Image (spheres, coloured by chain):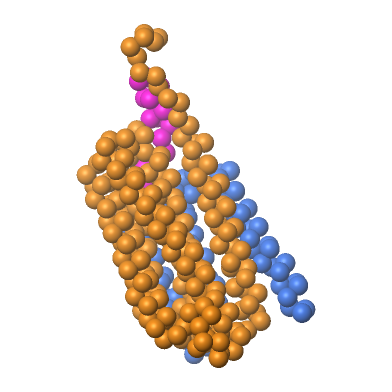
């Protein structure tokens, strides 16, 4: 039982309910903003809004709901590397398909 | 330290277990990432059809599903926080809410797909065969990506239901909750994927 007690002290930081609710409200607001801006007459602006808002929403879920903000640095680094890898591959893809 | 009657303390590696789940999530990100690569390549090839394809989809259900999944992520996170604080009943309530919201998502998806299929918009349909190539690819990607996502929702609900049983049987407690946390991570990823699917298909118009 002593082992379990030591282990309990290593537990992660408990996020208050309040924080989660606030993040949720922000996510709902951003979703509304996304829908509204998608209807804009200015298409380039619509696209930019989407390119900014969508990763922001994903980031909020990753950092707060998935606890990434409170995790050790190496885990955040791994997440960014994975997303970075995907972005890189998509970017490299365009070097090919834009010239076909 | 130990007498013959002492229960063997199983070695649990909280950090290792969590890292293991994250590594699995990376494979999921790359899995869907592969489909996003396809989407970007074909969007660049058929910009008009992809832009207009979204008009055939039901934006209301798409947005409703987004709200459902975002709320289910909230309840999943609350469930974990609750068990960490020792509030078992709150944790169970939130977990049940998460599962119900997940099922609501699937019901919406059924209604949505039924509508599109009844209008002849399904892979290999004669109606789609009449339309330009770009439309066919748009719908092919729509069904593949939202379909694969739907399968992940089903898997997530099943996983959460198993966790619910563990919490009810006190196998998950305030000092041993990382299985619930890991299930929550999977569920949140399902939400993140949908966050990207929404603008790509529904709001493209």
Q: Residue at position x 41%, y 70% from top?
A: A30
Above-or-below relation of B139 to A88: below
Q: How many badges with numbers are in the image?
A: 0
Q: Residue at position x 39%, y 10% from top?
A: B2
Above-or-below relation of B132 to B201: below
- Where residue B166 sits: x, y (%)? 31, 40
Q: Residue at position x 47%, y 64% from top?
A: B149
Above-or-below relation of B183 to A53: above
Q: Is residue B120 or residue A81 the one in the foreground?
A: B120
Residue B155 part of the magenta-drawn span: no
Q: Colour of chain B?
A: orange
- Where residue A83 sits: x, y (%)? 60, 58
Q: Residue at position x 75%, y 72% from top?
A: A95
Residue A19 visible to an observer of this rendering:
no
Q: Is residue B174 left or right of residue A73?
A: left
Q: Colour of chain A?
A: blue
Query: Which residue reaches farthest left?
Result: B89
Residue A9 part of the magenta-drawn span: yes
| Quarter location, residue B119 | bottom left
Quadrant location of the N terminus of chain B in the rendered image: top left
Q: Is residue B54 or residue A7 the one in the foreground?
A: B54
Residue A34 visible to an observer of this rendering:
yes
- Where residue B60 sits: x, y (%)? 36, 79
Q: Which residues are magenta?
A: A1-16
- Where residue B25 sits: x, y (%)? 52, 51
| Quarter location, residue A20 | bottom left
Query: Which residue reaches farthest right?
Result: A99
């Amino acid at each position: 039982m002593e082992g379990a007690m030591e282990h309990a002290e290593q537990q992660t930081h408990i996020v208050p309910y309040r924080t989660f609710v606030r993040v949720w409200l922000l996510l709902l607001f951003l979703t509304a903003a996304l829908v509204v801006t998608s209807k804009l007459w200015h298409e380039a602006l619509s696209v930019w809004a989407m390119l900014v808002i969508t990763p922001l929403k994903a980031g909020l879920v990753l950092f707060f709901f998935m606890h990434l903000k409170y995790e050790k640095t190496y885990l955040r680094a791994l997440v960014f590397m994975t997303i970075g890898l995907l972005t890189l591959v998509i970017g490299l893809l365009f070097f090919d398909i834009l010239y076909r | 330290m130990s007498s013959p009657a002492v229960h063997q303390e199983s070695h649990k590696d909280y950090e290792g277990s969590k890292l293991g789940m994250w590594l699995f999530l990376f494979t999921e990100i790359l899995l869907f990432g592969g489909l996003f690569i396809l989407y970007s390549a074909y969007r660049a090839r058929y910009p008009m059809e992809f832009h207009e394809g979204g008009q055939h989809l039901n934006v209301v259900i798409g947005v409703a599903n987004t709200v459902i999944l975002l709320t289910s992520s909230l309840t999943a996170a609350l469930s974990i926080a609750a068990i960490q604080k020792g509030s078992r009943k709150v944790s169970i309530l939130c977990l049940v809410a998460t599962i119900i919201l997940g099922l609501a998502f699937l019901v919406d998806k059924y209604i949505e797909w039924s509508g599109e299929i009844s209008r002849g918009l399904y892979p290999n349909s004669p109606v789609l065969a009449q339309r330009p190539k770009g439309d066919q690819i748009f719908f092919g990607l729509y069904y593949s990506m939202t379909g694969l996502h739907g399968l992940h929702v089903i898997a997530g609900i099943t996983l959460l239901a198993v966790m619910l049983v563990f919490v009810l049987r006190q196998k998950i407690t305030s000092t041993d909750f990382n299985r619930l946390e890991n299930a929550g991570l999977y569920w949140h990823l399902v939400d993140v994927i949908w966050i990207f699917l929404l603008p790509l298909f529904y709001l493209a118009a």
